[in-house]
Image (cartoon, rainbow, N blue to C red):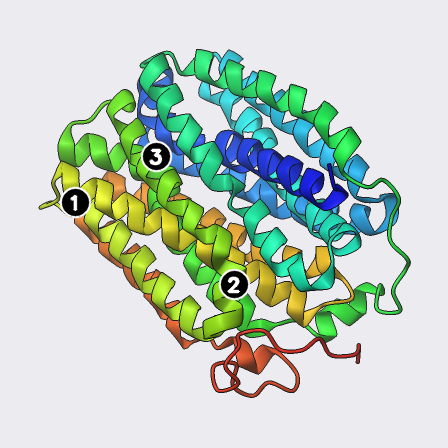
Amino acid sequence: MKAGVSLGATGFALIAVCYGFARFAFGLFLPRINADLSLSSTLGGLIAGGSFLAYCVAIVLAAHLTERLGPRRVAVAAALVAGAGMTGIALAPSGLWLAPAVMLAGSSTGLSSPPLAAAVSRVVAPARQAVTNTVINAGTSAGVILSGPAALLAGADWRLAFGLFAATALVLALAVVFSVPGRPGKASASADPRSLYRRLPVRLVAAAFLAGAGSAALWSFGGELVALRLDWDTGDAGLLWIAIGVAGVVGAVAGRWGDRFGIDRVHRVFLVMQAAGIVLVGAGWTTPALTLAGGALFGAAYITLTGIYLVWGVRVLPDRPASGLMVGFLTVAIGQTAGAPVFGFLMDRFPALLPVTLFAGVTVLGLFARAGKDMPGAADADARGTGLAEPQPPR
């Protein structure tokens, strides 16, 4: 098997486990966990936000370690940390135990993405790197798809589901050893951390924060919203996760769409789709069909948007791909860290339509961010017929 294909398949699987299982499955099982451990929506939101916060810390650490230790060690650590965190969730006897376990599991996502971006930059031909990166990123969809049937099969037994997820993560760690390159790349002249701040893509930061904050509505509270609106239990809510995951496969072609139509055009379309998905799932007038349609819109939008932010960041920092990915993904997670507790707080005190509408509106605010202004030599990404500026030499 060619190294690029092997890396792509293993990276796809690692992202599926870390993002789909260790991070986003928590929102699917949250209503049942809340009932079993006597958690309020506010506390559930704080725990979910803690997972995103752990991600923020981990992705910065992973970008730093990948440039020094190489991709393999960091990717293996991601799989092992995911397994340990989900084992802790499965065994949690109380909210006090659950919170650090959720944070540990969530940190695995931050550890997984930077080493994979760095590995792609070393193993895959430049012309195929954007496509390979967005295909790997779409592994989130596979994990979300599989967590849906797991919820249907496990029913109220969320501990069994997380136990199986943990076992999968530990097996995957072995596959990573044989598929991800081990040695760090050559040191770049721009490896000085100060160079990252000098070239920080501020519009990417703004867009990713707003999209991330808005997405917390469904990733953290999708299960509670369908329980409230449709009286669905955890097993039924698995259908929403399946819809999100299946539609999210669309995000695998985010790199191609960015090349063909321009980052800005693709970005605007899918921001509106994410906002529409949030409203369709959380509105008081929703139906089962509209809820699943909303989940599909949200899934396609979220995976495509994160793929676009990945390509956007790597193109702005072509000499530091792990750091380029880190900027966009970190900011999405910061938005989710802020958004989840706020949404939970509002859910406890106001009708659900208020936080749903507010968070859809927050997503739409990202329409004002333009990728072309972050990229030297590309005043208007759409005007050039491509969303991807040619890589510029370090300044």
The secondary element bearing badge 1 is classed as helix
Task: Examine the rendering and report whether any part of residue 257 can be seen.
Answer: yes
- Residue at the image position 47 percent from the left and 35 percent from the top: 142
The three-letter amino acid code for the residue at tag 3 is Trp
Which quadrant holds residue 131?
Answer: bottom right
* In front: label 2 or label 3: 2
Q: Which mark is residue 256?
A: 2
In the displayed structure, 388 sits above or below 277; it is below
User: Are discs 1 and 2 less than 8 Å apart at CB?
Assistant: no
Whether residue 330 can be seen here: no
**Where on the picture, by quarter, is residue 9?**
top right
- Name the residue: 40% across, 16% down: 158
Q: Amino acid at mark 2?
A: Arg
Position of residue 65 relative to residue 242, above or below, is: below
Residue 34, given in percent of the width and then of the height, sits at 34, 23
Q: Secondary structure at mark 3?
A: helix
Which residue position is annotated with label 1? 290
Instruction: Give how far apart the Cα atoms at labels 1 and 2 are.
Output: 29 Å
Q: How many marks?
A: 3
Q: Which amino acid lies under the numbered mark 1 shown in the image of this protein?
A: Leu
Q: Residue at x 53, y 30 (%)?
A: 22
Tell me the residue that label 3 is attached to. Answer: 241
Q: Relative to residue 25, is residue 374 drawn left or right?
A: right
